[in-house]
Amino acid sequence: MEYKLLLILLIILIGTLGPIQTGVNATLSTYLSHPSQAAFISFLGGVIIYSIILIFLKPPIPNLVELKKIPIWAFTGGLMGSCIVFGAIMIAPKVGAATYVSTFITGTIIMSLFLDHFGLMAFETKPIDVWTIFGASLVISGMMIVNFR
């Protein structure tokens, strides 16, 4: 239980980075000629960090046979990340951090419930029950209050 509590606190801490990252990227885009440049710089920072990590950890390079076994959709994470970052850069400054993040979290909760319920991708099956629906409805209600008060 203590381990799970520590993980929950870590996730909350990581979650605080989302709106900060959105603000950083939106600010950066105001100094550049196009928001896509800010997104590029954001991802370039990630490439640099992960390059350094890979240099130090030295994991084996996957061979072509291993790569061919991976489902094609499993390579779309970076594309989705790009959509998230670019969408945040374009939309968050127009609607505000609280509106953007509460609405984003609502979408995240809805998809998370779907993935867990059906055990899709790498997720263990966790059927939706009345408590899960209650918790999700609280999140959705919070988003509605933030956006339509």
Image: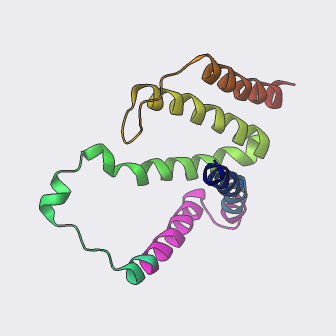
The x and y percentages for residue 46 are 51, 69
Using the image, determine if residue 103 lies above or below residue 117.
below
Q: Quadrant of residue 104?
A: top right
Q: Residue furthest top?
A: 130
Residue ID at (70%, 57%): 13
Q: Is residue 78 visible?
A: yes
Of residues 51 and 60, the one nearer the viewer is 60
Of residues 2 and 123, the one nearer the viewer is 2
Using the image, determine if residue 43 lies above or below residue 110.
below
Q: Quadrant of residue 59?
A: bottom left
Span colored in magenta: 26-52
The magenta stretch spans residue 33: yes
Main SS category, magenta section:
helix
Residue ID at (45%, 77%): 53
How was this image coloured? rainbow
**Quarter of the C terminus within the rendering:** top right
Determine whether, in the image, residue 127 is placed left or right of residue 96. left
The x and y percentages for residue 47 are 46, 71
Of residues 140 and 24, the one nearer the viewer is 140
Q: Residue furthest right?
A: 149
The x and y percentages for residue 107 are 59, 32
Q: Residue furthest left?
A: 65
The x and y percentages for residue 73 are 31, 43
Of residues 12 and 46, the one nearer the viewer is 12
Residue ID at (78%, 29%): 142
Using the image, determine if residue 31 lies above or below residue 105.
below
Q: Is residue 96 visible?
A: no
Residue ID at (39%, 31%): 119
The magenta stretch spans residue 75: no
Determine whether, in the image, residue 148 is placed left or right of residue 101. right
